[in-house]
Image (cartoon, helix red, strand yellow):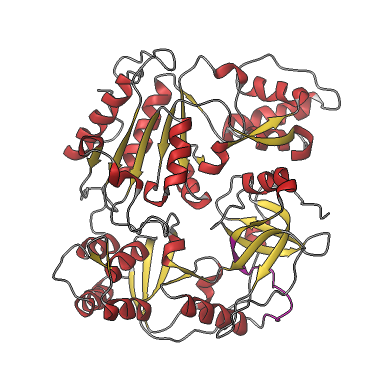
Amino acid sequence: MTEPSVTFSEDQAAAYDSVSDTLRHAGVNLEDGMLAPPGSGASGVVALIGKAGSGKTLLLAELFKDLQQAGVEIVSGDYESRRRKDKRTLAVLAPTNKAASVLRLRGVPATTIHRILYTPVYDPEYERIAEWLAGNGDRPEIEGLSDQALDRAHAFYATNKSIPGALAAAGLRGSDFISGWKRREDPLDIGFVDEASMLDDRQFADLKDIFPTLILFGDPAQLAPVNQSGTMVFDALPESRKLELHRVHRQDADNPILDLAHALADPQLEFRDFERMIEDMARHDERVVWGERVEVDLMARSPVLVWRNATRIRLINAFRSVHGAPEDALLAGEPLICDGIELPLKHRKKRLDLEARGLIKGAQAVYLGPGSKPGFSRLHVIGAEDPQVSAASIVKIEKPDEEEPFIPFAARMGATFLHGAAVTIHKAQGSQWDTVQVFAPDLFVAARMGRIEAGQPLWKRLAYVAITRAQDRLIWVVRNRLSRPTHGLQVDDLRGLPATSLTLEVQEQ
């Protein structure tokens, strides 16, 4: 076994060895770095599962490093060399932008599943720059680009490994070098999928078509996708293909948030007992807060997590009210959730452009202001590699006790958005925030109803998912009250990011 750069627990080491054995049968030997040609080994799917804190992400990161060291080429969603057909490759995927960004912060160049299903088509002239940056060609001479511009591109790529970012650093726009997007035609090789509990059957089938070897990393205690009848795609795998991790205490020692999440596994634990546990923990550890009200300042970047849609809508309208938001417009800094893209089939390319930039269903964004045309919005897409985008938008503000949402402004077609100051726990899966507010009265209602999902009380599954969205601090909100804001909505922190983004606008027909 390749000597890992961290000390594994016993079950992590066993899981590492099992995945290494799967890769060896697929023709990638991590022990000696020997790589067989693509397609010469066995194929298959393996699931590495475990609850929060069990070390799944650590294992994924270490396996990625060892595969890269063995000479496996990393495939990202922004560019693929045409010269990679005879090379062994790895793509690291996540269902959402936010989940992919969590991996990128750990040095793993992850992309979304959508970005791997659809590939960019580069202009042949600028593709020469991409091949040079990727180490597959000589430094080109491009009409209209100075040596200084190419030097800037080279310096950017050396640090960030992003072809679009490097070309933007050279002064190019996306419309200069990306001529379109197409559905992937050729299969890839090895795929790692984080947050695999979020996959539905259709996504899983797509991934199996693309990747002969697929390693799923998932949490069996999460909520199953809403259209999966309470099951996850790895549930149907043979037991021999499922590797289970247990909690790694040395990595997450003295973490009260994970202590609470794991306490939910006790079948004797009732809701009131759990709340007493939270209240007691809040007295001794500032990372857990017994909240008497919703903190409105946090809602602009970290939504309140709720179970019921009625609660979500009520909190959103309270958030807008305390900020003095008008009914006929959005304020810069208001959070949004992408609810899909409404475009007819003839605008398929424009749909792919927007989805490739991160505007997929469930994506979080912050409204920066109106675009250059009526109905257009300037947005910061949370977790996207190139977050700034301008797009035709349809914004829906739902109102309490009203069936139809209020639409303050809209293009005739484009990306659709709901307000993001509060979201359901289902939609929060795959995301993490430094501080998370969980609206406990909703979970109390779920507990009173006595609903069971996949053999476990629904309130426990909801509480587990909600709690594990918090990285540093958990606020368990027990009262239906909202604080007053201490400052107005802000966007300066987002506008201050490096201007390497591309503007994609959907032209209305």
Q: Position of residue 499 (x, y in %)?
A: 70, 47
Farthest residue to the right: give it.
144
Q: Is residue 9 visible?
A: no
Residue 333 colored magenta?
Answer: yes
| Residue beneath the point at 36% across and 50% down | 197
Residue 80 as seen in the image, left or right of residue 241: right
Q: Position of residue 171 (x, y in %)?
A: 78, 37
Asked if residue 279 is positioned above or below residue 345 in the image, the reply reads: below
Q: Is residue 374 visible?
A: yes
Quarter of image, res 215: top left
Residue 13 as seen in the image, left or right of residue 63: left
Q: Which of 477/150 is in front?
A: 477
Q: Which of 53/46 is in front?
A: 46
Q: Which of 400/158 is in front?
A: 400
Farthest residue to the left: give it.
268
Asked if residue 257 is positioned above or below residue 188 in the image, the reply reads: below
| Residue beneath the point at 15% across and 66% down | 267
Q: Secondary structure of the magenta portion, mostly?
A: loop
Q: Position of residue 27 (x, y in %)?
A: 35, 17
Quarter of image, res 287: bottom left
Residue 353 colored magenta?
Answer: no
Asked if residue 299 is positioned above or below residue 253 in the image, the reply reads: below
Asked if residue 17 is positioned above or below residue 193 in the image, the reply reads: above
Q: Which of 411/345 is in front?
A: 345
Can you say which quadrant of the picture contains the C terminus? bottom right
Q: Position of residue 85 (x, y in %)?
A: 54, 17
Residue 206 as seen in the image, left or right of residue 271: right
| Residue beneath the point at 75% across and 28% down | 123
Magenta-drawn segment: 325-338
